[in-house]
Image: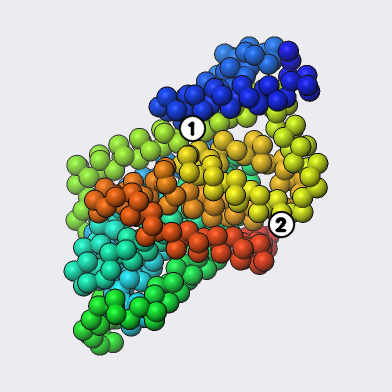
């Protein structure tokens, strides 16, 4: 049986799926499970030496210059997680946001939006903002389900607003510009944050009995004085995103600027000690190694599946339905929602792109736009049980049951579905800014 035997396609798919789910179900790391599936595919369906193929593919994927930005952005987020940034953000934002319908609940959304611009991780965004906002909002009497739900949803903005680890992984997978993808995520990220804030305002109007007492006013001068606490993080955002927008730095170079800026910020705040420096470095190394292992396994699986002809067969099968681009996006939305219930976001992206990439290219869908679509549906996976990572983080922070947190976050899930509809209706939200940046750099 060879990779060119078309009649064996169904058998090949069955073998791949059986081995994959067996390994994942037995608790094997995702990266090793992917390598195991690919190795079995190479042995069973191709004449090539699986050992040498794996070595070459793993080395090629791990030595990508573009991927250098990944551990640096992770390290930047870990450094900032150990600073007083969340406390300063709350003090700086609170006087302004208290005037909005829904009051200080908006600090969950705006705080996550601001921190997402200096951290590519949803989990880091959730932990940093949550460790300050949860106690403060509880103390002021906000309903627990709103505190938990809005934080769970808003933290997913860490995946969309640049720098985004998911966009880096997607860009490497489809060979697309990381800087263009980062720019594409800015406007949709702000629109999604706006939808979250509209939800809070609607809650405030629909359930006035649950609103706590208004915050005492401190006046314009007091609010302006507290706003000075936001200056360090604003400078860091301008340093990272502004350098890419102006064409001064690539995504990899901007990540290095971000690390230097984060170290300087931590040092000025007095949060940078030998202990915190080593702790941030080790945490970044663990996360980076985990993602790198997943990418290595996915690269080898992509090679193996390419030899067997499975991606071509599946793409041809779906093409036979003659779906319009909108129908294809609707089908992929459902597909990724189901996949996201069992895999984390980055694993879902690298695992499926070998099959999905040919489909979207054949359908004429813009790869930059599709990257933002992928991020939105992966954000949904962060708050859907049983493997919603944000749910696990919130469970550890609040001690609520997984069922309670999932129910509190469900309205945010529906808002993300609405965001997919908005992206389909207005694709320029994702493609306009990257095209402007490219024109400015020409």
On-image quarter of the C terminus: bottom right
**Foreground of the two, 191 or 282:** 191
Point 78% across, 23% down: residue: 6
- The image position of residue 301, as x and y in percent, is 59, 27
Q: Residue beneath label 1, please?
A: 294
Say whether residue 214 is left or right of residue 348.
left
Which corner quadrant of the image does residue 171 belong to? Answer: top right
Q: Residue beneath label 2, please?
A: 326
Task: Please tell me whether residue 382 is drawn above or below residue 57 in the rendered image.
Answer: below
Point 67% across, 22% down: residue: 12
User: Does the CB distance between marks 1 and 2 fall below 8 Å?
Assistant: no
Task: Please tell me whether residue 89 is drawn above or below residue 215 in the rendered image.
Answer: above
| Numbered disc 2: secondary structure | helix
Task: Please tell me whether residue 139 is drawn above or below residue 344 in the rendered image.
Answer: below
- The image position of residue 33, as x and y in percent, is 49, 25
Point 60% across, 24% down: residue: 16
Along the polypeptide, which appears first: circle 1 or circle 2?
A: 1
Say whether residue 159 is left or right of residue 151.
right
Circle 2: is it few (<14), some (14-19), or many (20+) Cα within 10 Å? Answer: some
Point 60% across, 49% down: residue: 334
**Foreground of the two, 199 or 410:** 410
Dot label at residue 308: none
On-image quarter of the N terminus: top right
| Numbered disc 1: secondary structure | helix
**Foreground of the two, 362 or 416:** 416
- The image position of residue 358, as x and y in percent, is 72, 40
**Foreground of the two, 376 or 94:** 376
Circle 1: is it few (<14), some (14-19), or many (20+) Cα within 10 Å? Answer: many
Q: CA distance from mark 1 to mark 2?
A: 30 Å
- The image position of residue 236, as x and y in percent, is 38, 60
């Amino acid at each position: 049986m060879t990779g060119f035997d078309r009649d064996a396609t169904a058998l090949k798919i069955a073998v791949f799926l059986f081995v994959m789910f067996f390994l994942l179900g037995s608790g094997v790391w995702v990266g090793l499970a992917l390598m195991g599936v690919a190795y079995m595919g190479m042995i069973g369906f191709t004449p090539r030496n699986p050992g040498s193929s794996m070595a070459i593919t793993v080395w090629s994927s791990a030595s990508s210059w573009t991927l250098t930005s990944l551990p640096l952005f992770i390290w930047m987020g870990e450094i900032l997680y150990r600073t007083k940034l969340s406390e300063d953000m709350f003090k700086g934002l609170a006087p302004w946001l208290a005037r909005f319908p829904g009051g200080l609940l908006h600090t969950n959304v705006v705080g996550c939006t601001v921190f997402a611009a200096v951290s590519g991780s949803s989990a880091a965004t959730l932990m940093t903002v949550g460790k300050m906002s949860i106690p403060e909002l509880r103390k002021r009497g906000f309903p627990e389900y709103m505190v938990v739900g809005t934080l769970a949803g808003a933290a997913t903005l860490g995946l969309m607003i640049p720098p985004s680890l998911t966009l880096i992984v997607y860009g490497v997978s489809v060979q697309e510009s990381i800087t263009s993808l980062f720019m594409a995520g800015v406007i949709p990220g702000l629109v999604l944050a706006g939808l979250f804030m509209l939800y809070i305002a609607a809650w405030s109007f629909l359930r006035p009995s649950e609103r706590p007492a208004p915050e005492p006013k401190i006046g314009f001068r007091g609010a302006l004085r507290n706003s000075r606490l936001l200056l360090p993080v604003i400078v860091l955002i301008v340093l990272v995103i502004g350098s890419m927008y102006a064409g001064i730095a690539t995504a990899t170079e901007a990540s290095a600027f971000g690390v230097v800026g984060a170290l300087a910020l931590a040092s000025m705040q007095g949060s940078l000690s030998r202990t915190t420096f080593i702790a941030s470095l080790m945490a970044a190394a663990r996360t980076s190694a985990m993602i790198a292992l997943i990418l290595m396994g996915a690269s080898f699986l992509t090679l193996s599946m390419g030899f067997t002809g499975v991606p071509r067969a599946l793409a041809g099968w779906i093409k036979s339905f003659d779906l319009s681009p909108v129908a294809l996006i609707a089908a992929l939305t459902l597909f990724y929602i189901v996949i996201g219930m069992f895999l984390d976001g980055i694993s879902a992206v690298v695992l499926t792109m070998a099959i999905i990439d040919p489909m979207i290219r054949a359908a004429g869908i813009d790869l930059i736009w599709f990257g933002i679509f992928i991020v939105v549906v992966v954000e949904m996976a962060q708050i859907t049980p049983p493997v919603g990572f944000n749910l696990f983080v919130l469970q550890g922070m609040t001690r609520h049951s997984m069922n309670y947190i999932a129910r509190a976050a469900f309205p945010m899930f529906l808002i993300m579905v609405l965001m997919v509809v908005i992206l389909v209706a207005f694709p320029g939200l994702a493609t306009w800014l990257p095209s402007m940046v490219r024109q400015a750099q020409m």
